[in-house]
Image (spheres, rainbow, N blue to C red):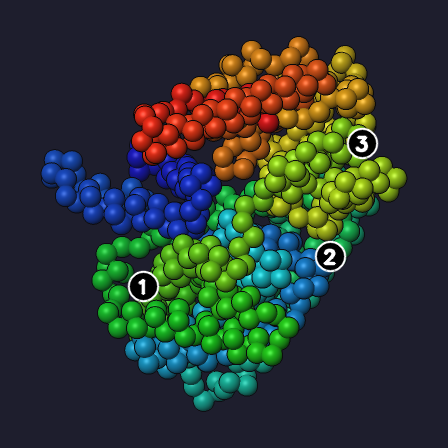
Amino acid sequence: MIDSLLVKLALIGVIGIGAQWVAWRTGRPAIALMLIAGLLVGPISGMVFELLPAQYGDLGPLLDPDRDLGPLQEPIIKLAVAVILFEGGLSLNFRDLRHAGNPVLRLVAFGVPIGWLLGTLAAHYGGGLPWGVASLFGGILVVTGPTVIGPMLRTLRVPARVADTLKWEGIVNDPIGALLAVAIFGYVAFDGPDTTVTSVMRDVVAATVVAALLGVALGFAITWLFPRGYVPEFLKAPVLLVTVIGGFVLADIVKHETGLVTVTVMGVVMANRPVHSSRWLRRFKEDLSVLLISGVFIILSATLDWETLSAFRLRFVLFLLLLLFLVRPATVLLSLMASAMPWRERLFVAWIAPRGIVAVAVTGLFAYRLTDYGVEGAEALVPLSFAVVIATIFAHGFSAKWVAQKLGLDLGKGEGVLLIGANDWTTAFGSYLKRIGYKVTIADSSTFALRAARRRELDVWRGDILEEVNEDRLDLSEYQQLLAATDNDAFNALVCADLGPEMGFEKLTQTAPQDKRGAVQPRARVLLESRRSVEELQRLVAEGWQFGRTRITEKFSFDDYRARLAKGAETVAVRREDNSLEFFSPQHKPWVEEGDEVISFVPPEQQAAQQAVRASRKAEEAAVKDGSAKAAAAKNSGNGPGGSGGGNVENGGE
């Protein structure tokens, strides 16, 4: 049963997605954890089973893709790479080039030839590969891999120009590196009297142009058919997926690896043309690509065996050092010389260059073919490609955040609060949050409604929040919480439903609907345990209700706080020691611990009582301090012993 293909496929999915989840929980690079997981179920498990007594039989590794998938392994990986590259192209909107256009152009136009030349020299002199094999490997290494850049950027907050540059470079250079390897392979493998650089390049360029035109045609066809209703909504995602696979295979039949160009161009065309369902299609592709990236990385890392690892030579370490500390930095710094990009950003881009699926898959494909043709040195390509992937993923994945912090590019975890709807209550709440240290933005489509927020010097955003996010004019990563509190209950629900997949529904809250009969169903957590609507909250603000905060301590617990809370007063949110914020709702009551601060919304009489208590405690503390000072002075002067009779006084209010 363990050897069943069905069990193996389930194992790949569970381990891959499990590694992604662990990475999310721990903040570690997802690619590195998937690589470790693949090694554990692959060669390491095989080694462990070999140590077991003979009566257990020859179990072999838990996952051996060559044994378990057989001839299906190569087409599975190639089709997965096609879908991943299409999804990457689908995220390449030309709006992103407003800041990153010049750096991306330089990294493609100058970076590819410079990187190929330096990579070839490093592979030959550092890795000891023959010139032909070294030039092929140098061509493959111009790619940086969207499959690893994407997950890495997901855990970092760096300036938009840096993120867009890395994203565009990874996706655009992937097919370029593969095509460069195709051209070099054609020259090396079929070296003869009729084979010249000109003839090989002519064939590759012609095939590339055909593949690009096919991608443009498919992109325009999809964006013409979908908005006009020629494809029903329930078939759009399947039709798109089949079109991507069909276009990739068709181009690949014309010339190997040109299918990568087709799917990338198709994605870019769709990203920059209006498709009414584009947002939902993109989410479908993102979910699918996460699953495929997980599966492919598990498969590729599990294919490593001890025979492949034993082919790794000590001299390859010199090549890896040259690749990390000379080839990539020199390529980027020379390409971006005299550009408008600040030098700190250039240094960060020069360090970040992890390789991923395309590098390993393309290298493995050409290595097997070159070995069949008897080309010297081809057998070293597979272990060397895995060494590059492992070294770059671990070196760049684990150091990216540290390097960004040292260069002053790390924007940190988004701790802002986004309030949707400008009214008296959100303005008062936003002002209070700003006063205690939060970045607050109030978004509304009405200039008139935003006037009060502007007077209180709050950040405002005028426009339809859904349109602003869809057009990438508002960066949601800056905010840890979103509260939809307009007077339109249906719009609040729509905002939460639409932005939930972007931010995570655990970060969304909306005010309770005014109609308690359930005519409009909330699409996120409802603010306040009492389910007060925004109209009620505005009325209470007009009556003088205010916000306050109470620190929970060992002597003043959350239960003590609730016992002292005035009738009708609300616990709005809890502020953790790490500055994270959680709202109270009927569906979610945050766990409040010692050191947390509870933000409350209380009536005027409780505010007056708290002020009286605070004044009384301050007077007591002052008297205790004065008495302690006098006693100390008397003791020092020899007039007799003294001491302090004061203790810690717990503050039940702000």
Question: Distance of mark 3 from mark 2, alpha carbons?
Answer: 36 Å
Could you say which is closer to the camera, residue 369 or residue 128?
Answer: 128
Q: Quadrant of the C terminus?
A: top right
Q: Residue at x 39, y 69 (%)?
A: 324
Above or below: residue 570 compared with residue 241: above
- What's the residue type where badge 2 is placed? Asn
Q: Earlier in the sequence, mark 1 or mark 3?
A: 1
> Residue 601 appears in which quarter of the rendering?
top right
Label 3: state its secondary structure.
loop
Any mark on residue 272, and which? Answer: 2
Quadrant assignment, res 639: top left
Residue at the disc numbered 1: 383
Instruction: Point out which mark residue 423 bears.
Output: 3
- Name the spot of residue 289 as percent of width and height, x first: 54, 47
Rendered residue at 55%/31% (across/down): 575
Q: Position of residue 10 (x, y in %)?
A: 41, 36
**Is 422 situated left or right of 531 in this image?**
right
Cα separation, mark 2 vs mark 1, equals: 40 Å
Disc 2 versus disc 1: nearer the observer: 2
Res 355 → quadrant: bottom left
Dot 1 amino acid type: Pro
Q: Answer with mark 3 or mark 2, whichever residue precedes in sequence.
A: 2
- Of labels 2 and 1, earlier in sequence is 2
Q: Is residue 360 left or right of residue 94?
A: left
Q: Residues within 10 Å of mark 2 (few under 14, many from 20)?
A: some
- Nearer to me, 571 or 393: 571
